[in-house]
Amino acid sequence: MPFFLRNIDTPPLLTLIFFLLFSSFENFAVRAQTHETNAPALLRPVQYVITLAPVNGGKAYHVYRNAKIVANLNNGVLISGKVRAISKDSISLDYKNYAISSITNFKFNPGNALGVAAAIGAVIGLAAIAFTASSKDNQRSSAEDAIFYSGIGLTAVSVALLIPNYFIKKNFPRTKYEYIPVALNM
């Protein structure tokens, strides 16, 4: 032990070290926050989402960047692709711009809690299979067998729920939904 630490009581020393450590992080966080709020608005581009609000009330849906959508235009043209950008009056699908006012119908998968639960269940089931499949001497106990077959069942049910949930797309016609561009960070 170094000479200068022999005569110092440990708890007060640790308290002093923790105080200095956390107070410096707190000061840094306050400085970083004030720097961010004082940044000019030109450095922060405004990002938009399109809110699909039902005309008669109900649950609103949102079109985000990177969503895969299919849209119908006023002239009957069907366009599809990945949303690259959204502005207050236009949407960019695969780097081609279209006016939001010229779109008559959106069709995309808004996602739901069942899809998230099915994906989590599939991952847990695969983890259970992987955990029990790699046993020594190709011999499993009855508990490992139960985990293995439960993992197979959980994976099968989760994938069965996940597949149709991924491919089902919902229609959002302009007659039933308002298309409202909303700025996220202003």
Image (spheres, rainbow, N blue to C red):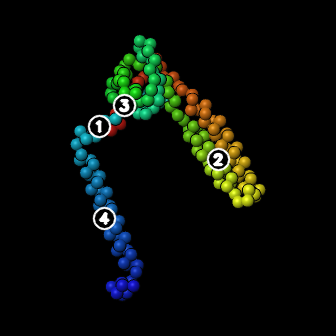
Mark 4: amino acid: Ser
Spatial separation of the CA atoms under disc 3 and disc 2: 37 Å
The part of the image, by quadrant, that contains residue 131 is bottom right
Reading the chain from its start, which is encountered first: label 3 or label 2? 3
Of circles 1 and 3, which is in front? Answer: 3
Q: Earlier in the sequence, mark 2 or mark 4?
A: 4
Comparing labels 4 and 1, the label whose residue is closer to the camera: 1
Q: Residues within 10 Å of mark 3 (few under 14, many from 20)?
A: some
Seen in the picture, residue 34 relative to 3 is either above or below; the reply is above
Q: Is residue 115 above or below residue 33?
A: above
Residue that numbered label 4 is attached to: 24
Drawn side of residue 73 relative to residue 40, left or right = right
Q: Secondary structure at mark 1?
A: loop
Question: On screen, 134 above or below 56?
Answer: below
Q: Residues within 10 Å of mark 4 (few under 14, many from 20)?
A: few
Please tell me the numbered disc located at residue 45.
1
Foreground disc of the pair 2, 4: 2
Disc number for residue 85: 3
Instruction: Categorize mark 1 by other alpha carbons within 10 Å: few (<14), some (14-19), many (20+).
Output: few
